Image: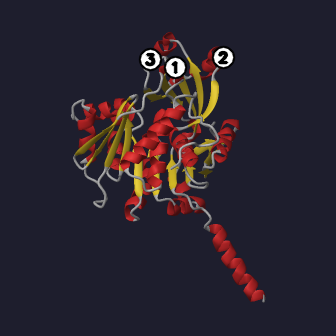
Amino acid sequence: SNHLTKAIYRSLLKTMASTIQIRILGLGNPLLDISAVVPESFLKEYDLTLNNAILAEEKHAPIYQRLIDEFKASFIPGGATQNSMRVAQWLLEPGSTGFMGSIGSDSYGKILKECAEKAGVKVHYMIDANNPTGTCGVLIHKNERSLVTNLAAANSFKISHLGTSEAIEMIDSANIYYMSGFFITVSVDSMIHVAKEATKNHKLLAINLSAPFLVDFFTEQLESVLYYTDYLFGNESEAEAFGKKFALGNDVGEIALAIASRPKSSGKLPRIVVFTQGSESTIVACEGKLMKFPVPVLEKSLLIDTNGAGDAFVGGFLAGLAKGKSVEKCVEVGHWAARQIIQTSGCVFPKECEFNL
């Protein structure tokens, strides 16, 4: 009977070991948003433009404390990819999403972990004890946002983390991988590792252009990841930066078609490019065809800020994808999710999800 007990114990351990059954895995920079409404003079003082995202330089260092001291900033769990995972999880069955990134061993890190877990996202953070958890200054002016990121601990993510048993299980279990372009400045080798897994195992890889500076200054790294990409997301300012960089003109639709037709690692599936344009129609390009999806009108008085809108759109779209929905349906879910997020400050949403996927 001892032998039998051992066999049962072994099979139990095996079952326990393979309990990670996520559908979507995100890799990116977990950041705590320090968000406040600021006057235009404050943006000018630090050379910041709206609808843009940059990495903080030395001159931006005072921003964070000033947002807290002078503008009554609120702390909102952020990080583009983690936001998207939280939104996707909100729309899906429990245990559908996972996330990896690097945080510090501090209170901000704890807030991020608790927020993700409360949302039902399975997190497997790399812990960097030498640096504080990353923060993102979110400067809101006339409902638009300008992002200034201090990566700190988020910058420490290493490919070695993907070799941990929990990471391997997450990678094996998920059938959709999502990574923001922001992760390119942190760990391209991790991105390529996951990208190759996707191609090899016929899984889907989605990435985001994330910010114009990535297109301009991390061009080769972006191209190396794009080669493996099945779904590329971005907004109009990122699309225009790509058009300028690769001499594709400034028509967002033409740029989307050109990116969709670039060489691709897996010949099985055509690449799909999805560009949002705020309240203007969302553009989808695939196999030489261009589709436009109008964004349902939201009364101006209901708009709080656009922080997290793009992340929410992606989260909604990926949730639709995880359920095997059509591109049209995925865009509809994305639009719905973004609509919820722009009516609150930051990427925050009610506990119950009213959208039935």
Q: Is residue 50 visible?
A: yes
Who comes first in sequence, dot 2 or dot 1? 2
Closer-to-camera residue (342/113): 342
Who comes first in sequence, dot 1 or dot 3? 3
Task: Look at the picture and state if 74 lies above or below 111.
Answer: above
Marks 2/1: CA–CA distance? 28 Å
- Identify residue type, mark 3: Asp
Disc 2 and disc 1 in contact, CB within 8 angstroms: no
Residue at the (50%, 48%) spot, across then down: 27
Q: Position of residue 244 (x, y in %)?
A: 26, 31
Pick out the residue farthest to the right.
1
Mark 3 crowdedness (10 Å alpha carbons): few <14, some 14-19, many ≥20: few
Q: Which residue carries the number 3 mark?
A: 47
Q: Position of residue 340 (x, y in %)?
A: 53, 34
Mark 1 crowdedness (10 Å alpha carbons): few <14, some 14-19, many ≥20: few
Residue at the (47%, 55%) spot, across then down: 323
- Identify residue type, mark 1: Ser
Q: Which residue carries the number 1 mark?
A: 301
Disc 1 is placed on an element classified as helix
User: Is 84 displayed left or right of 285 in the figure?
Assistant: right
Closer-to-camera residue (111/45): 111
Tell me which colouring the rendered structure shows: secondary structure
- Identify residue type, mark 2: Asp
User: Is 119 displayed left or right of 196 in the figure?
Assistant: right
Marks 3/2: CA–CA distance? 20 Å
Marks 1/3: CA–CA distance? 29 Å
Task: Look at the picture and state if 242 lies above or below 20.
Answer: above
Who comes first in sequence, dot 3 or dot 2? 3
Q: Which residue carries the number 2 mark?
A: 69
Quadrant of residue 47 in the image? top left
Q: In the image, which is nearer the foreground, mark 2 or mark 1? A: 1
